[in-house]
Amino acid sequence: MIKPWFRRALPWALFDWANSAFITTVTAGFLPLFNKSFWSVGAPETVSTFRLSVAHSVSGIIVAILAPVLGAFADHCGARKRFLLFFTLLGVTMTVGLFFAKEGQWAFALVLFAVASIGFSGSNIFYDSLILNVADKDKLDAVSALGYGMGYIGGGLLFTLNIFAVTRPEVFGLSSASEAIRWSFLSVGVWWAVFTVPLMVYVPEARPVEPFAGVRKTVRAGFVQLRETFHEVRQHKTAFTFLIAYWLYIDGVDTVIRMAVDYGSSLNLPGDSLIKALLLTQFIGFPAAIVFGRIGEKLGAKTGILICLVVYGGVCVFGSFMETVTHFYALAVTVGLVQGGVQSLSRSLFARLIPADKAGEFFGFYNMMGKFAAIIGPILMSFVGLVTGSPRLGILSLILLFGIGGILLWRVKVPNEAESEAALP
């Protein structure tokens, strides 16, 4: 029998199923390789990598600046779902546009990718905050894990189909692997749009704080509320400490996700093996995310996150000595075991630390910290690699982020059941 909490949360979790295809097929999968071999054809590898890094950084900075303002604005006028839909359509449109980027058009392609990334990250601000509308306080860990688990399955299924199309393009009536990759971008846009519908139709939205007063007044009120929220976040010392810890350790997590293929390529590992390893991570990540949801219920979300961070530290050490494709597969399996856990438990733990009526604003800061981390992580890794001449030392440097973030997280005092009663619905 389907449990009530699962039935209520499933339409919300399907958004993870929808937009995770962008991360798997586009961001982590085909785009880094396609950028080097197709859009930036003829350019040195260091140049093509720099171009992609700029696209990541620019989109991250824009979202980081906008995130808290958008969250405050959405809370003020009760427009979380409308904002989610706007950014989703922005991401879908730009992702579909990648289909039309031709060989050598690296600037056009990377602008499309950067704007699509803004759409992806912007929509997640409002998606994350809606968890409080579908989950009771005792099910936050399970519902958050369900979302990430659905993301691994949905993103992994489409990624599997796209990998098959790239390796066997003739089966689909395509002339080459390059054409199949272009069609894979189109498939992501369609997938993302279709599976967003359940959330828009079935997930409830809390009533606005006050009636909508027009764009100008609401935007002004949003900025005022942003300033007030910053001071309020500072006053919520536990939530503020967690945000600093999260900023550091999620930096390492995002860097591993974004730079894995590029790092493997720098070690001259075959591209098809790197893509298959990413796919393996997806399907391991689904049951692992669900397991960590149970760990969060039994041992506490903070304990579960700390376990993940210890594993990530080991990944950095092992990765610095990696030599073969087999080693890369082993790392992919290990990352798959903890990636969904650290993401889902971080979201549910933060939801416990914040007032429910300020969810959009606080999750705006939450996403802002994540986006600034995504900017700093690749820079740290590439800077260390550049200075030392060794990409292996670059990946080893990420231990700093996991270590310091873990120490700060250890100091976060999670409220007990009675204390969190007023903050959660």
Image: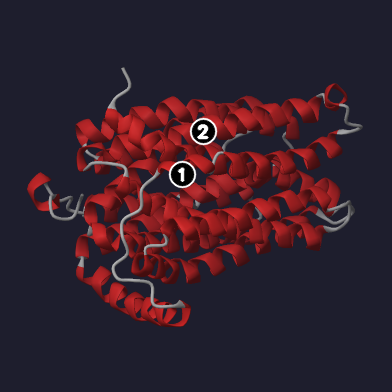
Q: Are marks 1 and 2 in contact (CB under 8 Å)?
A: no
Which secondary structure lies at badge 2?
Answer: helix
Which secondary structure lies at badge 1?
Answer: helix
**Around disc 2, counting alpha carbons within 10 Å, would you say few (fewer than 14), some (14 to 19), or many (20 or more)?**
many
Q: Quadrant of residue 203?
A: top left
Colour mapping used in the image = secondary structure
Q: Is residue 114 left or right of residue 128?
A: right
Amino acid carrying label 2: it is: Tyr
Q: Is residue 420 left or right of residue 46?
A: left
User: Would you place residue 132 above or below residue 229 in this image?
Assistant: above
Instruction: Give the Cα separation between the discs numbered 1 and 2.
Output: 23 Å
User: Would you place residue 174 above or below residue 214 in this image?
Assistant: above
User: Would you place residue 18 above or below residue 115 in this image?
Assistant: above
* Badge number at residue 201: 1
* Of callouts 1 and 2, the N-terminal one: 2
Q: At 62% across and 67% down in the image, what residue appears?
A: 58
Closer-to-camera residue (63/280): 63
Residue placed under numbered mark 2 in the picture: 152
Q: Quadrant of residue 238?
A: bottom left
User: Would you place residue 343 above or below residue 226 in this image?
Assistant: above
Q: Position of residue 43 (x, y in %)?
A: 85, 56
Closer-to-camera residue (344/335): 344
Furthest residue in direction left, as rendered: 418
Quadrant of the drawing holding the N terminus: top left
Q: Nearer the viewer, mark 1 or mark 2?
A: 1
Closer-to-camera residue (216/338): 216
Q: Position of residue 2 (x, y in %)?
A: 33, 22
Amino acid carrying label 1: it is: Val
Closer-to-camera residue (11/43): 11
* Badge number at residue 379: none
